[in-house]
Image: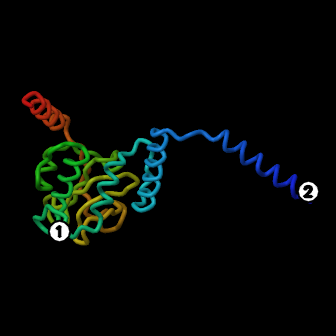
């Protein structure tokens, strides 16, 4: 009985010591932990290794749209096409307004080789066509988000189909980013 009493007392004292040494989490620590958990979750779902520098807003946006059906000319959750989806990403995630068709969007970029692609860059395809017919947004690790015939999805540039039709990557030209920032400044000044 004496051993049991000593064991219980020792256990209670250890718990008491742990409770005294635990720090109270701060809101910043909670936010960092939540963001880390979100990145881990999205990384597993999308098959993209998210780093500390990854744009969590981009991955959350894509995740929210996955499974939205494809509809040529569509631009809503009821159905969306590749260029409207890309336009929506750039508007909501990057605060940039881009053109509506994949060919017109290509006119706004500096071409980038596949091995130079960065998160947020655009990927263009010529699918059974001599001209650009498909666009998506690069996520990293060879993966890109797009509205395909199967709906909004994350696909791999290395897949036989996408590898065959890949045309070029592209990074939005600085002049277009500057135009958007200037328009935002003018809006703020008039308000």
Which corner quadrant of the image does residue 63 belong to? bottom left
Badge count: 2
Q: Which residue is mark 2?
A: 3
Identify the residue shown where x is 28% and y is 47%. Answer: 121
Residue 129 coordinates in the image, percent (x, y): 15, 65
**Tag 1–tag 2 contact (CB < 8 Å):** no
From the viewer's perspective, tell me whether residue 6 is left or right of residue 134.
right
Q: Which residue is mark 1?
A: 78
Mark 2 surroundings: few (<14), some (14-19) or many (≥20) residues within 10 A: few
Instruction: Judge by depth and name the residue closer to the eye, 167 or 186.
Output: 186
Instruction: Judge by depth and name the residue closer to the eye, 26 or 133.
Output: 26
Identify the residue shown where x is 24% and y is 69%. Answer: 151
Residue 8 coordinates in the image, percent (x, y): 81, 54
Instruction: Judge by depth and name the residue closer to the eye, 53 or 163.
Output: 53
Q: Secondary structure at mark 2?
A: helix
Residue situated furthest left in the rendering: 190
> In the drawing, what numbered circle is on residue 41?
none
Image quarter hosting the C terminus: top left
Mark 1 and mark 2: Cα distance apart in space: 69 Å
* Image: 164 above or below 180: below
Identify the residue shown where x is 14% and y is 34%. Answer: 184
Image quarter hosting the N terminus: bottom right
Residue 16 coordinates in the image, percent (x, y): 72, 45
From the viewer's perspective, tell me whether residue 31 is left or right of residue 174.
right
* Image: 79 above or below 23: below
Residue 113 coordinates in the image, percent (x, y): 30, 47
* Image: 153 above or below 99: below
Is tag 1's residue or tag 2's residue first in the polypeptide sequence?
Answer: 2
* Image: 136 above or below 95: below
Identify the residue shown where x is 35% and y is 62%. Answer: 156
């Amino acid at each position: 009985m004496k051993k049991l009493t000593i064991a219980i007392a020792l256990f209670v004292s250890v718990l008491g010591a742990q409770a005294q040494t635990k720090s109270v989490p701060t809101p910043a620590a909670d936010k960092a932990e939540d963001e880390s958990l979100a990145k881990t979750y999205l990384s597993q779902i999308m098959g993209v290794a998210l780093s500390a520098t990854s744009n969590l807003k981009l991955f959350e946006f894509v995740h929210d749209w996955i499974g939205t059906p494809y509809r040529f000319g569509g631009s809503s959750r009821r159905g969306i096409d590749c260029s409207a989806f890309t336009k929506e990403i750039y508007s909501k995630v990057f605060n940039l307004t881009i053109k509506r068709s994949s060919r017109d969007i290509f006119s706004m970029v500096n071409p980038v080789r596949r091995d130079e692609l960065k998160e947020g860059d655009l990927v263009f395809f010529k699918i059974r066509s001599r001209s650009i017919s498909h666009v998506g947004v690069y996520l990293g690790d060879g993966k890109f988000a797009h509205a395909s015939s199967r709906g909004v999805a994350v696909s791999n540039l290395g897949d036989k189909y996408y590898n065959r039709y890949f045309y070029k990557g592209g990074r939005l030209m600085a002049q277009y980013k500057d135009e958007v920032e200037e328009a935002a400044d003018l809006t703020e000044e008039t308000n």
